[in-house]
Amino acid sequence: MARYTGPKCKLCRREGDRLFLKGARCHTAKCAISKRAYPPGMHNFRRSRLSEYGTRLREKQKTKRIYGVLEKQFRKYFEEAERLRGNTGENLLVLLERRLDNTVFSLGFADSRAQARQLIAHGHIAVGGRKLDIPSYLVRVGDVVGPRGHKKSEGIIREKVEAHQGRNVPTWLILDPKKLTGTVTQFPSREDVSLPIQEAYIVEFCSR
């Protein structure tokens, strides 16, 4: 499973925005953006304004980092979004939202998408009652996501659900905190994506 293993706070500083890559830490004064709100590197170096190309590149990079996907995989999502009917940018965001690691995070089973990816890779998550260890799996309508039928897995998920009580769950998911399961009732829409992403810039960049 290819993934970024470098310092996550440096990615937020590079994009100049909170990407919420470290869970609860991103909401505290310890957040790198709060402490050092400037890009990493030579701090005395005078940086020029971004060109149109640079602005669109940064938007693509930011989206990749939020969802934790690398370039090759991101390109595949974009090609699939182009083949689907409708707006390519919105289709791209819907595909990324449907990833299993994002679904687990959205249900409150993990503090961040990276932690959700780890839970899935370690075999703690089941879809439809069957263990699934593929973070990039795209959930479908009717899928029921929950802990694998194991005490350790249930304990981990229960602890997170209780810690995240009151957290808003997207409208395309229904969480049952007693059964520790989440059901996909429909595909997500653009309105369900509250992240600061300008998908039109990504489409312009990737369509060059």
Image: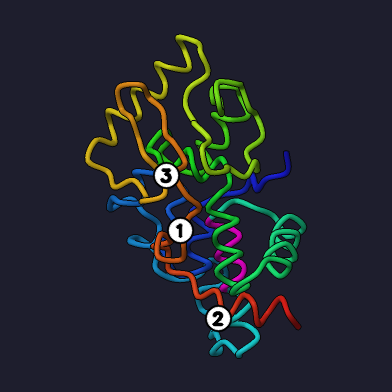
Residue at numbered disc 3: 106
**Left or right: 110 as drawn, with respect to 57:** left
Q: Nearer the viewer, residue 180 or 63?
A: 180
Callout 2 amino acid: Phe
Q: Position of residue 187 (x, y in %)?
A: 50, 52
* Magenta stretch holds residue 98: no
Callout 1 amino acid: Leu
**Residue 37, numbered circle:** none
Name, please, the residue furthest toward the top.
151
Residue at numbered disc 1: 19
Q: What colour scheme has been applied to the protein in the rendered image?
A: rainbow
Disc 2 crowd rating (10 Å Cα; few below 14, some 14-19, many 20+) is few
Q: Position of residue 37 (x, y in %)?
A: 39, 68
Residue at numbered disc 2: 45
Give yes or no for contact between labels 2 and 3 (Cβ–Cβ under 8 Å). Answer: no
Q: Is residue 73 above or below residue 3?
A: below
